Amino acid sequence: MIPRSASMLSRPLARRSLPRRFVQTIPALTRPTQQQQTRWVSQADIDDPNMNGGYINPPRIKRQFRDPYGDWWDKQERRNFGEPVHEDDDILGIFTPEEYTHTSPGKAILQIGFFISAVFGLAYIVGFWYPDVPAVSRTFEDGLEAELGGPGALRAKKEGEEAP
């Protein structure tokens, strides 16, 4: 453990020295630089616009759309030995999330709309046909004031009072 006097500066010393250092270093850090970089287009950039060293990039097709029963060298990844791999192979591989192609977006929105209207329609029908309270609330003379705790206690409904 480090002694307290060695690990902390005294407060007056810290108060005097920190602002001066802070004020002196800020202008040096915020000065704008006048450097300008010029990049010339080389012949390599013209010859190889994709900058991949002339690698032949196969078409961008997910492996899930390849024939699962084809005669593949790697049956799990659905590719042959020596076949060039796309640069986005991690996105196009068989273990990436599948593309959902079972329905179109318009049909999906229509199905969601039918579901929402069915839920609200059922709620309306239940609310319309659901019976009201099956019993009539009881009334008591003097509202059972003594039985429920005396004066100042919450009272039950008296004869002729309306329900709250």
Image (spheres, rainbow, N blue to C red):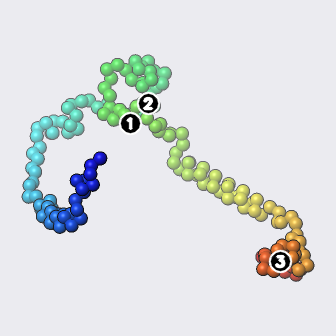
**Mark 3 — residue?**
150
- The x, y position of residue 18, in whole percent, is 18, 63
The C terminus appears in which quarter of the rendering?
bottom right
Look at discs 3 and 1 and give the one toward the viewer.
Answer: 3
Q: Which mark is residue 34?
A: none
Question: Residue drawn 60% across and 54% down?
Answer: 113
Q: Which mark is residue 94?
A: 2
- Name the foreground residue: 159 vs 34: 159
Q: Is residue 157 above or below residue 76?
A: below
Residue 14 shown left or right of residue 104 in the figure: left
* Quarter occupied by residue 86: top left
Q: Which mark is residue 91?
A: 1
Label 2 Cα neighbours within 10 Å, binned few <14 / some 14-19 / many ≥20: some
Disc 1 element:
helix
Question: Residue drawn 44% across and 18% down?
Answer: 71
* Quarter occupied by residue 133: bottom right
Disc 3 element:
loop
As measured in the structure, the alpha-carbon distance from the residue carrying label 3 to the one carrying label 2 is 77 Å
Label 1 Cα neighbours within 10 Å, binned few <14 / some 14-19 / many ≥20: some
User: What type is the residue that disc 2 sits on?
Assistant: Ile
* Quarter occupied by residue 129: bottom right
